[in-house]
Image (spheres, grey):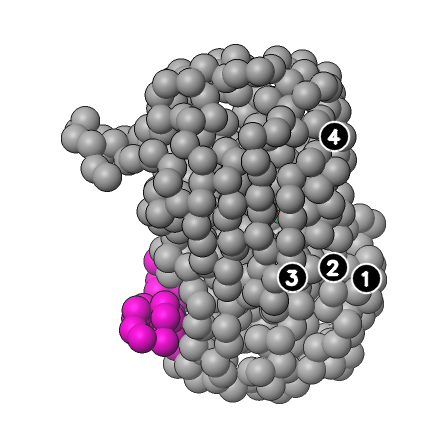
Amino acid sequence: MDRIAIIGGAQLNGTIPVSGAKNSAIKLMAASLLTDEPLRLTNMPRLADTRFLGKLLTRLGVEVTESDGSDGQQTLLHAPEITSGFAPYDLVRQMRASFNVLGPLVARSGQAKVSLPGGCTIGARPVDLHLQAIEALGAKIDLHEGYVYAQAPRGLKGAEITFPFVSVGATEHAMLAAVLADGVSVIHNAACEPELVDLQECLNAMGAKVEGAGTPTVTITGVPRLHGATHAVIPDRIEMGTYAVAAAMAGGEVRLSNARPGLIDALLDKLKEAGAGVEETADGCIIRRDGQRLTAVDIETAPFPGFATDLQAQFMALMTTARGESRIRETIFENRFMHAPELMRLGADISVSGGEARVRGVEQLEGAEVMATDLRASVSLVIAGLVARGETTVSRIYHLDRGFERLEEKLGACGAQVRRIKGDGEAEL
Ligand code: EPZ
């Protein structure tokens, strides 16, 4: 298995272009199941997760064609007909968001058999709200032997869906199913993440009538059919935030381009509070830090526009060398501190109790061998490695490859000493 080796100590200086958002791209890809015409997605990231989903969609009848031309990275998805409504366990367990094919399959062909995703390292992550939404839209749902059987032979019907708490995936799933339902659906207590707005824009470009995404109430007026469209994937706010933290950690000056302002304000406010220089630009931001040590600040994760849980591990890495004590509260997932013991292997001083971690900044981290436990945890270890004395090696980086496109190249272009060590032991720059 590949590893990443980082030699700490280099400042970061340069420009990092932000890729298309993984967490938007995989929901937009699922939207291709809703029409027999081609959906062209531009600004597509090339990641393990988009490949996983491409594999599953191909099995369901979607022709998936990737092209990397002068117009950038694109994926053309075309499902003239749904050839199978079966999403097997071996594909769904590899990526939970694959579960979101259930709604579009039932909406278009009246039936689906989709594996339950199973457990996850960051929390239990049930799918009860997803099933509540699909059932409210009139599908008959049965659970047998780890599979969800959904049937709506006469199509889905518009409905009022009220979520008891905010779920990004369930809101997206309800939108993906309701666009072809007969009548009007209203989603109350919807998630407001920017990826929901992106999904609304793509669905509307395909002929859907969706309003209100980005607010807690989304209204969907069902249409009998959708058509093909071209849509550019929104920039990845988590990738942008990750490199913003990396720049604040390593010092230097990094411009993040190809992004959008307003996507990570909660993080940028905390970076300013900690003492980093932050300048918003038309297509991203510039992060600066001279030699001065950052000051510890507290964070609490929350749904958008609050501090993103997907940036919590990276921020914890940043706080390991700040002056003072930082309190980090995780409120979205119950087990999202798996990076703390790994950061402690690098010399960080962290104690975790329930949903709160206390990080007492140390002057210097020391390179060590560490292990990635999930996608965002793994990049937090790379960030810590940027300032640790000597070499840090991060193993199990297949997690990293799920969500960060060309990470070594992007950091390397700014002066970081990061290289991938192939599984056979051969080093590759
Ligand atoms: C999305 O997960 C993202 N994944 C996550 O990013 C992100 O951390 C999360 O939203 C929160 O922002 C994708 O978009 C693919 P939720 P999702 O449903 O949709 C509970 C990454 O690193 N819940 O908003 O699965 C759930 O257990 C990933 O890229 C239920 O109880 O998150 C959690 O505690 C990790 N029942 C809370 O709700 C349900 O039916 C919020 O989860 C659904 C969710």
Question: Going from the N terminus, do you reach mark 1 or mark 4 first?
Answer: 1
Q: Give the percent coordinates (x, y) of residue 359.
A: 67, 19
Q: Could you tell me which quadrant the C terminus lies in?
A: top left
Amino acid type, callout 2:
Cys
Q: Earlier in the sequence, mark 2 or mark 4?
A: 2
The answer to whether marks 4 and 3 mark residues whose Cβ atoms lie closer than 8 Å is no
| Front-most of residues 376 and 63 | 376
User: Which residue position holds label 1?
Assistant: 216
Numbered range of the magenta stretch: 55-78
Q: Is residue 175 above or below residue 171?
A: below
Describe the element under mark 2 as helix, strand or loop.
Answer: loop
Please tell me the numbered disc located at residue 261.
3
Task: Give the alpha-carbon distance from disc 1 to disc 4, as whole Å.
Answer: 29 Å
SS of the residue under disc 3 = loop
Mark 1 vs mark 3: which is more N-terminal?
1
Which kind of residue does numbered mark 3 sit on?
Pro
| Label 2, label 3: how far apart the Cα atoms are | 16 Å
Mark 4: which amino acid?
Answer: Val
Residue 343 in view (yes/no): yes
Residue 345 in magenta stretch? no
Tell me if 180 is positioned left or right of 402 in this view. Answer: right
Structural distance between the alpha carbons of marks 1 and 3:
21 Å
* Residue 297: mark: 4
Q: Nearer the viewer, mark 2 or mark 4?
A: 4
Most foreground residue, 178 or 372: 372
Name the residue beneath numbered marker 2.
Answer: 192
